[in-house]
Amino acid sequence: MRYYSLSLFLILSLFTSLASAQSLPSITPAATYTNSDGNTLTETTISESAPLAVSFISGAENTDGWTAHYEWRFYKEGKRNAPYLIRYDKETSYTFTDAGTHRVELWATFIQGTDTIEYTNSYWTTTATAISITIAESKLEMPNAFSPNGDGINDVYKAKNGWKSIVKFEAAIYNRWGQKLYSWTDPAGGWDGKFNGKDVKQGVYYVMVKAEGADGKKYNIKRDVNLLRGFTN
């Protein structure tokens, strides 16, 4: 049985063992995701907010006639020998919800008759760098006022710009009698100052928010909300 690893022996074998001089299988792992600006990118180093959905591509080439086995290994930085997830697909996807730096490696084995090419532990240790995904620590703040007057500025009551890595979110608006006027579950969403399709009066309302960050931080926000109908910048 002929066995190849990514070494000088593999290079020399191109001229000896494989008389047909065929191209050998190879992998070029990468990750595709949509960043906070809405752009879809393919990278090997990512730094974003959670939740972050990532698709992993093997970049496998020259695999015709070879039996392929793929192993995606997910682990936290510093815990390479203790992966928290292993997937056995050529391509895979995962949504990251935990803060910190994650590493993702692709190990692959290609078999053809008695020939084996293996991109595994030694390959990633000596030749390549794992895909790196860093999830930011969480941040969430709610404003104390908004002005839904149709001028396109501060018309919606929502989380302040710059919120990060919020994986659970529930918010509700109440009037001074405790009546719930509106609720939402996406930190990117918010309240437009209406109840049952009609504008509510200018005045003071109340917001309650319960949320959780990718870093495990809990948010329990309760505060007054000033609705200013006639305010303009």
Image (cartoon, helix red, strand yellow):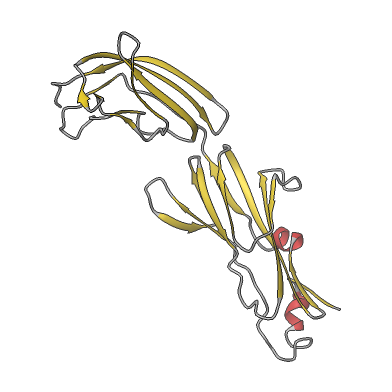
Instruction: Locate the C terminus and report the quarter of the image it occupies.
Output: top left
Query: Looking at the picture, how far across and down is residue 107, in whole percent?
Result: 70, 61
**150 above or below 179?**
below
| Residue extending furthest toward the front | 196
Residue 150 horizontal side relative to residue 220, left or right: left
Residue at image x 61%, y 70%?
60
| Residue extending furthest toward the top | 177
Residue at image x 44%, y 26%?
170
Query: Looking at the picture, how far across and down is residue 30, in whole percent?
Result: 56, 60
Residue at image x 72%, y 63%?
123
| Residue extending furthest toward the bottom | 19
Query: Looking at the picture, how far across and down is residue 225, in whole percent?
Result: 30, 17
Residue 13 horizontal side relative to residue 194, left or right: right
**146 above or below 63?**
above
- Front-lying residue, 44 or 53: 53
Could you tell me how many numbered marks the image carries? 0
Instruction: Locate the N terminus and report the quarter of the image it occupies.
Output: bottom right
Query: Looking at the picture, how far across and down is residue 59, in whole percent?
Result: 58, 68
Q: Name the image quarter holding residue 181.
A: top left
- Front-lying residue, 127 or 155: 155
**74 above or below 26?**
above
Q: Name the image quarter holding residue 56.
A: bottom right
**131 above or below 184?**
below
Residue 200 horizontal side relative to residue 127, left or right: left
